[in-house]
């Protein structure tokens, strides 16, 4: 790959303090990668953002919650259904390519891929303090 050119699906970006943008090591998809991300950028606190592109074709197996900041979810291709656990029940939000939704801070959420094909989505996440629970 040419200098300065990266594949976002493989190498996420950290947006940090001082308007920095730092290419991350190759994403492995496991929780150890996220632990390493926290060690590398935990000093940015709630202002740090992880920008990542993920493709999936099955429902997520867990819920997640980002307590200190909102998460933007932008559907690049396919159809994505977000499930957000709100005070008055679970809200479903379906996104088509080109649409986005926001997971508010502290809201448990999970996602499903559309019925016809895999989905690719861009996530901009305030990850400090992220928690997971089984779906």
Image (cartoon, rainbow, N blue to C red):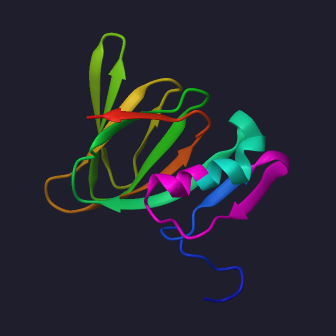
Which quadrant of the figure has residue 30? bottom left
Is 19 a magenta residue?
yes
Pick whichever, 16 or 77, lies toward us.
16
> Is residue 20 left or right of 23 when viewed as pictured?
right
Q: Quadrant of the N terminus?
A: bottom right
In this view, which residue lies farthest toward the front?
Answer: 32
Q: Quadrant of the C terminus?
A: top left
Q: Which contiguous range is marked in magenta?
A: 16-35
Across and down, in percent, residue 134 comes to 29, 35
Total labels drawn = 0
Which quadrant of the figure has residue 91? top left
Across and down, in percent, residue 93 comes to 30, 34
> Is residue 98 left or right of 78 when viewed as pictured?
right
- Residue at (71% x, 79% y) in the render: 4
Pick whichever, 77 or 58, lies toward us.
58
In this view, which residue lies farthest toward the top?
Answer: 88
- Residue at (55% x, 47% y) in the render: 124
Is 46 a magenta residue?
no
Q: Indicate whether 32 appears above or below 101.
A: below
Which quadrant of the figure has residue 76? bottom left
In this view, which residue lies farthest toward the bottom?
Answer: 2
- Residue at (73% x, 36% y) in the render: 45
Q: Indicate whether 25 appears above or below 120.
A: below
Across and down, in percent, residue 107 comes to 44, 24
């Amino acid at each position: 790959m040419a200098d300065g050119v990266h594949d976002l699906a493989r190498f996420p970006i950290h947006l940090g303090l001082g308007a920095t943008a730092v290419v991350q090591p190759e994403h492995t998809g496991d929780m150890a990668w996220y632990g390493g991300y926290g060690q590398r950028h935990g000093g940015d606190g709630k202002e740090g953002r992880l920008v990542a592109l993920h493709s999936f074709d099955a429902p997520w197996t867990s819920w997640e919650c980002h307590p200190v900041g909102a998460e933007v979810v932008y559907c690049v291709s396919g159809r994505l259904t977000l499930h957000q656990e709100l005070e008055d029940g679970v809200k479903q939000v379906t996104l088509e390519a080109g649409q986005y939704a926001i997971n508010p801070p502290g809201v448990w959420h999970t996602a499903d891929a559309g019925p016809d094909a895999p989905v690719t989505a861009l996530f901009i996440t305030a990850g400090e303090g992220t928690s997971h629970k089984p779906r």
